[in-house]
Image (cartoon, rainbow, N blue to C red):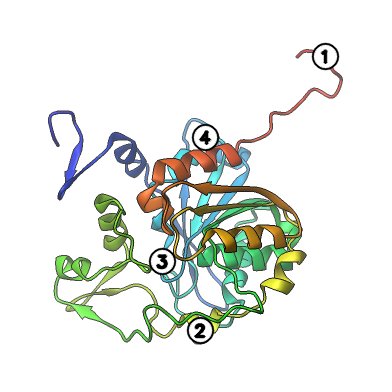
Amino acid sequence: MNSQGQMDTGDEVMPQWCQWAFSHQGRSGFVEGDAGKLHYLEWCDSSVGEPEKPPLLLIHGFRAHARWWDMVAPYLMEHYRVIALDLSGMGDSAHRDEYSPHCHADDIIRLIEALDLGTVTAVGHSFGGGRLLQACARRPELFRKAVVVDTHQLFDDMIIPPDPVGHTKPRFYPGLDVAMGRFRLSPEQPEALDFLVEHIARHSLRAIDDGWTWKFDPDMQSGIFAVADADRLLPTVLTPVDVIYGSRSLVVPDELGRRVYASLGNPGKRICIPGGHHHLMLDQPIALISVLQTLLQPIPSQNNSGEDN
């Protein structure tokens, strides 16, 4: 700690807002299924009974995990029962024998049903936003509202992008520090905060007998999910959808962000975070938290009789 009580992490100081968020760790849980275990984290505000709060589901990006929301989720638990899942083949969820373009939408639906969440509000980042839109189109009765954060969509006239990582074989490292030193964001993001990247990297690895390896399934290639179906999918999403993207994103440039928004069957708000890159929770976390808090603010109940309570 420094003289102001802030935590030093390498060359950067972890600010108080992040220390507070990390001090409120999500509770770990699993749901079973034919496709293997799904892991999730749940954040609890002990001052209010969680079952009384509406559920909020957070969905991470490709080859990521639920802890990408660790700096965001605690700031949303005042009004929500907050749950972040690990999609199959990522984080602490089971790897599949085979992946399909819609298998992760299946994960989202399976978790909602297994936890008996009823109708949820959901936020998906990047790849997770695309799987959320698929789930909303298939099972609209499960979703009250959706927010997609810097989510790329493929239209018929677009070229399918190559996997920026390419084929990934299993990699093993003798020590945690060595492994964390090999962690890279995709796409690269030079303005990401080091203490947040370090946190994400640490939770992207699992211990094995003789060292460390990445948690994601190396057999899960991005080409499996690169389906140019936005022209057909987006108009069928009748759940209200808000769109957030970064002004400097290499994944969702402004033109694409506007096109995705215009194609939605029930578009809500469209918000561009100035100066933000693709991984908004890593370079613009406070802005992202503030936008989500505003978009997800519950509507106060009104007295239908018109009389004061």
Any part of residue 189 in sight: yes
Q: Which amino acid type corresponds to the residue marked 1 in the rendered image? A: Glu
Q: Quadrant of residue 131?
A: bottom right
For residue 261, side relative to residue 79 (left or right): right
Q: Mark 3: which amino acid?
A: Ala
* Residue type of the residue flagged with mark 4: Glu
Q: CA distance from mark 3 to mark 2?
A: 16 Å
Tell me the quarter of the picture where residue 1 sits. top left
Q: Is residue 34 above or below residue 10?
A: below
Disc 3/disc 1 C-alpha distance (Å):
50 Å
Identify the disc placed on residue 307. 1
Q: Does 42 sit left or right of 70 as displayed?
A: right
Q: Can you say whether 276 is above or below 250 in the image? A: above
Which comes sooner in the sequence, label 3 or label 2?
Answer: 3
Residue denoted by label 2: 223
Q: What is the CA distance from the residue labelled 1 to the residue labelled 2? A: 58 Å
Q: Nearer the viewer, residue 56 or 181?
A: 181
> Residue beneath label 3, please?
64
At a point 60% along the width and 78% down the height, the residue shown is: 158
Q: CA distance from mark 3 to mark 4?
A: 25 Å
> In whole angstroms, how far apart are the C-alphas of marks 4 and 1?
28 Å
SS at mark 1 in the image: loop
